[in-house]
Image (cartoon, rainbow, N blue to C red):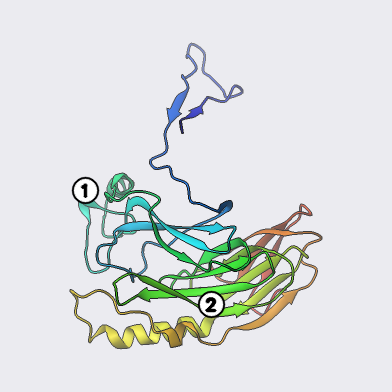
């Protein structure tokens, strides 16, 4: 169970005298199920960010949207890099940039954490509308946005709690629409904007840059005073909960559902696609144009 039969393309070119390659059987490195998961929404917590969770936590974490409105944060069984703990060389881990060799970086994917894949670290947002989309903030640790079936967008953030476990709280509740939000993404590379697309063909742009700037300032001010051997400080709620404002809305972005969106790495453009079959690229510098 779980094996995938990978067969060669029948139309692929085969040189004279060569024998077509035999099918390969590929097995997943890990396989698990999460109760109530919709199977349509998946995101990996950026492993290169500071790890604001228990010192015992070692995994790259995976977020799954669930029908009961919750987001399940699960272990993958793959070892994550820890800030302040260089792990270059053959023992490299996912998210570690100290390995100079590309071969070593490829080997990092072979490193397992020893934990059980699928163990739920946290369940966030239960009791709200079904999760339709989600995306992690690219620079704020343990911060993510959720698009819901009722047209709302929630932003959650976390620090490690008194019991050294993740303690999430909802810091923003946005109501841009009454239609499902199937598409959601932060701008890259800094996450200054949050984009959402609904089933009515609209695309919304929110300015969340104040939270990013406030967190960066608080982190830099506390860097000198922190002990290098201590875990990173908890992100201040005040900075994450900084004002978020709607800066633009494309009312007729698509003639149908907005299905997916992808930010350009320069932070200036956004690509969207919809059920109308159209793909559009938007200028994000001054709204959506």
Which residue is identified by label 2?
A: 192
- Tell which of 32 and 233 is nearer to you: 32
Q: Does 188 sit above or below residue 112?
A: below
- Tell which of 109 and 105 is nearer to you: 109
Q: Does 264 sit above or below residue 91?
A: below
Image side of residue 251 versus residue 241, left or right: right
Percent position of residue 181, x then y:
67, 65
Task: Estimate how packed mark 1 is, as few (under 14), some (14 to 19) or many (20 or more) residues with alpha carbons within 10 Å.
Answer: some
Residue at (69% x, 68% y) in the render: 150
Which residue is identified by label 1?
A: 90
Q: Which mark is residue 2?
A: none
- Tell which of 152 and 17 is nearer to you: 152
Percent position of residue 251, x then y:
79, 72
Percent position of residue 248, x then y:
70, 79
Image side of residue 164 versus residue 168, left or right: left
- Tell which of 243 and 70 is nearer to you: 70
Residue at (53% x, 24% y) in the render: 8
Q: Does 130 sit above or below residue 102?
A: below
Q: Does 180 sit above or below residue 193?
A: above
Quarter of the image where the C terminus is located: bottom right
Residue at (66% x, 82% y) in the render: 246
Tell which circle, 2 or 1, labels the residue nearer the N-terminal end: 1
Label 2 secondary element: loop
Task: Estimate how packed mark 2 is, as few (under 14), some (14 to 19) or many (20 or more) residues with alpha carbons within 10 Å.
Answer: many
């Amino acid at each position: 169970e779980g094996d995938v039969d990978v067969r060669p393309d029948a139309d692929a070119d085969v040189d004279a005298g060569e024998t077509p390659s035999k099918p390969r059987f590929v097995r997943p490195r890990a396989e698990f199920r999460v109760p109530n998961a919709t199977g349509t929404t998946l995101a990996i917590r950026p492993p290169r960010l500071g790890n604001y969770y228990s010192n015992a936590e070692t995994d790259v974490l995976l977020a799954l949207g669930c029908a009961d409105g919750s987001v399940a944060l699960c272990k993958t069984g793959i070892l994550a890099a820890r800030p302040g703990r260089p792990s270059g060389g053959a023992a490299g881990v996912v998210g570690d940039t100290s390995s100079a060799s590309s071969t070593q970086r490829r080997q990092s994917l072979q490193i397992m954490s020893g934990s059980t894949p699928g163990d739920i670290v946290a369940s966030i947002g239960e009791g709200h509308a079904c999760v339709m989309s989600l995306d992690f903030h690219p620079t704020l640790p343990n911060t993510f946005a959720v698009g819901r079936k009722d047209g709302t967008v929630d932003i959650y953030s976390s620090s490690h709690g008194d019991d050294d476990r993740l303690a999430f709280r909802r810091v923003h509740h946005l109501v841009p629409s009454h239609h499902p939000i199937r598409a959601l993404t932060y701008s890259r590379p800094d996450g200054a904007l949050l984009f959402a697309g609904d089933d009515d063909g609209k695309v919304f742009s929110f300015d969340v840059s104040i939270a990013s700037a406030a967190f960066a300032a608080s982190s830099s001010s506390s860097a000198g005073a922190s002990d290098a051997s201590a875990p990173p400080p908890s992100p201040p709620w005040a900075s994450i909960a900084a004002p978020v404002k709607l800066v633009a809305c494309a009312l007729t972005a698509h003639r149908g559902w907005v299905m997916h969106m992808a930010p350009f790495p320069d932070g200036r453009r956004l690509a969207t696609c919809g059920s109308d079959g159209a793909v559009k690229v938007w200028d994000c510098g001054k709204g959506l144009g």
